[in-house]
Amino acid sequence: MPFRWSRARYPLAVALCATTSLVALVLRPWLDQANIVMLFLLAVFLVALRLGRGPAVLAAFLSVACFDVFFVPPHLSFSVADVQYLVTLVVMLSVGLITTHLTARLAERQEAAQARESETRMLYGLARDLGSALTVDQVADIVGRFLGSMGMSSALSIDGSAGGPADFLVHGALDEGALACASDAYRRNAPVTEDPRAAGMMFLPFSGATRVRGVLAVGTGRAERLPLLDTVASLAGIAIERLHYAEVAARSELDAESEKLRSSLLSSISHDLRTPLTSLVGLADALAERGTSLPDDSGETAAIIRDQAHAMHRMVSNLLEMARLQSGRVMLNRQWQPIEEIVGSSVRLLDDSLATRRLAIDLPADLPLVSFDAVLMERVLCNLLENAVKYSAPDAQIILSAQLVDAELEVTVCNAGSGFPPGRVDRVFDLFARGQPEPAIPGTGIGLAVCRAIVAAHGGTITAENRPGQACVRFSLPLGTPPDVSAELA
Amino acid sequence: MTEPPRILVVEDEPQIRRFVSDALRKEGAMPLAAGAARQGLDAIVTHEPQLVVLDLGLPDMSGLEFIRSLRTWSRVPVLILSARTDEQDKIEALDAGADDYLTKPFGVGELLARVRVLLRRHAADTDATPLRRFGDIEVDLARHTARCGVEDLHLTQIEFRLLAVLLAGAGKVLTHRHLMREVWGPGHAGQEHYLRIYVRRLRQKLEADPARPRHLLTETGVGYRFQL
């Protein structure tokens, strides 16, 4: 009510009618009766404008009565001498009531508009506060204070899971019944009100742009406040989703940073380890080639130093490769290519050690292209060939073959020899596993583990097996759909 | 040759610089040494070497910048030494104008073989004969024919073009991108599988054992090298 003394509205209306009657009585000698009617209508209008609908209706009837009693002959009586006055009275009452109705409705509308405006301003304030919230706790706090200022208590129940089964984090106090209602509202994505488990409470689910994020629980809320509460809930949902994505972005930035750090660390370790090995290989080589100017076995010693440095380099390379593969995010540089690309280069890299064995290569000429990372797959082949040399006698046969089996390309490296120890065949791919408990042949047991990691990264499989008089390792790569190369590239 | 060839070694590790210089001196060359990129560029201006051996991991300038800057005014052959396993660095350096690379650690024999090829290429730039021989194969670049002994080899147009480009760069590493551009023209990035298929066909026609090629060698992850 715009008028402050709302309890005194009816007496005021009566007083105004009385005053109007007095003034009219005093002025009666100078005023026409039509103008006296006008004075009464003015009073009714003022009452309707300032005091509201009820007092105005009262004033309308009172005015008609006063006019009848004091100004319509016979005076001081309700009876009417001239029938014409009946028309006056009826018109006067009708005009008074219609005026009352119109004025009161106008006043009510204005009042509602003002209420709406203040609500909008408050919601705007809430949205602004939520926009600056940095944690979910702050969101809950801001919503709590906002509803608190309207005499309502509130709590937020937020789903912290990422798409999995709901995992609620409650900000505020909710008893068991209320929690059950909240989870109902969440599941149905519809408000829950008047539930016996939580009397007098309302539960409004809220969602961000992508999914339902939680439930706003309101205590002592009234049903006509539902639209407002709905808006509050959506504002909370938007704020919480914003926080969620801010967190996701921060986390992925952190991941990228640590990945960058790891790879730069690996490449600097790799540089630092290879530099002294390069000097060692080079200097030993230079010494070995000095030949005749040295005492008898010095040349041989230098050659051994060089070979050991090379062996160390292979070990270091495998270790670094393993570290890189185990860091989890290896970007494969996959290209469609024939497998002989890397067969030739692997064999060439190991020319020196393979010279003491008989190598047979069996590759059908029409093998399809396969998509793989050439550098990594070359390491697989090198490791397998190196193992084949290491675990076979001089002049033994090593067979490298490839063939199509179903939808896979299968590459096999076999060497004549005693084979893997029975019972340990499956474990040779484990990191730091060796064929024998105390092997006489030096090694770290990392080569095959690297092979398995690389083949697995390509979606293939690798297995070891003993064949009569042979040890074999076989790996397969999925074929996929090679690009069409039937057309000549113009 | 009356005067020994001058070879500049740009490498920040003194031990590596030392054995490379020693090996070059024994080979009859005159090694010059620089420990940093700027010093190296200055030395190229002053001494006009016939070959530059460049470490990719210099402290004061990336190897790539060095090569780009050098290639604006000099065509001296560059042999890269790279301790990195990252193939991308090598590819970029080669595409920027380097001629060949060696991955650390490398043996003296390997180093000298590369150096000899690059020096010979440099001297033989004015080779006027259209005939090229490797193994039992003779190629006539002018008449677009290839023979193995007395037998004619039938090469398609593209196969011959690829062979000609490989022969023109014999002894050097040729990146996939370079070969694609020279044989098929620009604008075929991402279609390297064509190149690989033609390389396979050439190997089947030219190599005695295509699985163990002796001339058309794969430089894994980088490109190909044609060895005469």
Image (spheres, rainbow, N blue to C red):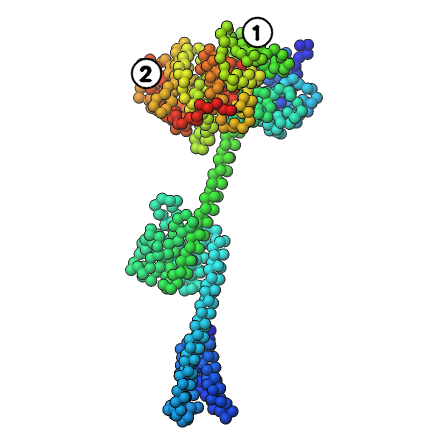
Q: What residue type is labelled 1?
A: Thr
Is A152 left or right of B118, judged from the image as shown? Answer: left
- Seen from the viewer's position, the closer of residues B76 and A354 is B76
Whole-percent x, y for residue A101 in the image: 42, 75
Whole-percent x, y for residue A290 in the image: 57, 10
Whole-percent x, y for residue A110 in the image: 46, 69
The residue under the point 61% across, 15% down is B121
Q: Is residue A397 above or below residue B46?
A: above
Quarter occupied by the N terminus of chain B:
top right
Query: Which image quadrant is residue A68 in?
Result: bottom left
Marked residue chain, label 2: A
Is A220 left or right of B223, judged from the image as shown? Answer: left
The residue under the point 44% across, 23% down is A486
Residue placed farthest to the top in the image?
B150
Query: Which image quadrant is residue B48 in?
Result: top right
Separation of residues labelled 2 and 1 (CA atoms): 47 Å
Disc 2 and disc 1 on one polypeptide chain? yes
The residue under the point 41% across, 10% down is A358
Marked residue chain, label 1: A
Q: In this view, does A210 lie above or below A450?
A: below
According to the picture, the residue beneath numbered tag 1 turns out to be: A292
- Seen from the viewer's position, the closer of residues B183 and A393 is B183
The residue under the point 36% across, 63% down is A223
Q: Is residue A131 above or below residue A482?
A: below
- Seen from the viewer's position, the closer of residues A380 and B69 is B69
Q: Which amino acid does label 2 sit on?
A: Arg
According to the picture, the residue beneath numbered tag 2 turns out to be: A467
Within-10-Å neighbours for mark 2: few <14, some 14–19, many 20+: some
Whole-percent x, y for residue A474 in the image: 37, 21
Question: Is residue A422 visible to the viewer in this orientation of the structure?
Answer: yes
Residue placed farthest to the front in the image?
A84
